[in-house]
Image (cartoon, rainbow, N blue to C red):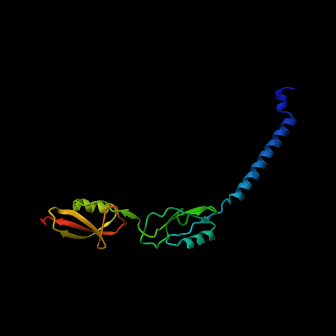
């Protein structure tokens, strides 16, 4: 029997037809299984958790069949209560699948502490820019007799002297003791 005769024989054509039917049935079954296992077309709406406590956020996410994942809490925001949600990903109102992780950034208990730099014998201008770059605030300026005019003689926080290397929270107010240019 020749190859061409075999390709057009009833036996071969029946086998091709059966193979095509089997492939179509298998693809149909796989698509139905995927539709049911991936919950195709079913979404959960992400709630707005901004400003809520951890426990409230967790309860709300469980009600919506979502999972909470806490991320780093480095940026203190005084507009929100301590340990409340300040950011979330995905954003509120987004449509996500069931059991999706919602990443939350929490508000820490306060500003992080920063090392006080060594500013003694530096000019007021340099000291001011250095402290402001570290997000400290300049408080009261007091002058003492010293030949160097506007030279930093010391630093104070809440009336107490501070030394280089001490740690203070960001946005702390630092008072400067400066020289007035007069001989002692």
Q: Most extreme residue toward the left, as rendered?
A: 183
Q: Residue at x 58, y 70 (%)?
A: 58
Q: Residue at x 82, y 42 (%)?
A: 17
- Residue 59 image position (x, y, % from top left): 60, 72
Q: Quadrant of residue 98?
A: bottom right
- Residue 122 image position (x, y, % from top left): 23, 59
In the foreground, 102 or 177: 177
Q: Residue at x 59, y 63 (%)?
A: 95
Residue 9 lies left or right of residue 72; in this view the side is: right
In which quadrant will I find the C terminus? bottom left
In which quadrant will I find the N terminus? top right
Q: Most extreme residue toward the top, as rendered?
A: 2
With respect to residue 59, does 29 lie above or below? above
Residue 119 lies left or right of residue 36; in this view the side is: left
- Residue 107 image position (x, y, % from top left): 47, 68
Residue 34 lies left or right of residue 129; in this view the side is: right
Q: Most extreme residue toward the front, as rendered?
A: 184
Count of all numbered marks drawn on residues in the image: 0
Q: Quadrant of residue 123?
A: bottom left
- Residue 31 image position (x, y, % from top left): 72, 53
């Amino acid at each position: 029997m020749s190859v061409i005769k075999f390709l057009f024989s009833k036996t071969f054509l029946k086998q091709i037809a059966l193979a095509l039917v089997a492939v179509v049935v298998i693809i149909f079954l796989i698509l139905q299984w995927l539709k049911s296992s991936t919950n195709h077309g079913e979404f959960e709406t992400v709630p707005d958790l901004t400003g809520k406590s951890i426990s409230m956020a967790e309860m709300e996410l469980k009600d919506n069949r979502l999972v909470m994942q806490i991320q780093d809490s480095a940026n203190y925001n005084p507009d929100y209560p301590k340990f409340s949600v300040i950011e979330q990903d995905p954003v509120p109102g987004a449509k996500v699948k069931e059991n999706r992780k919602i990443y939350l950034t929490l508000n820490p208990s306060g500003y992080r502490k920063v090392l006080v730099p060594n500013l003694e014998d530096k000019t007021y201008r340099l000291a001011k820019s250095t402290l402001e770059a570290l997000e400290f605030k300049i408080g009261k300026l007091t002058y003492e007799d010293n030949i160097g005019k506007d030279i930093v003689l010391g630093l104070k926080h809440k009336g107490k002297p501070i030394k280089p290397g001490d740690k203070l929270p960001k946005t702390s107010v630092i008072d400067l003791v400066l020289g007035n240019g007069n001989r002692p």
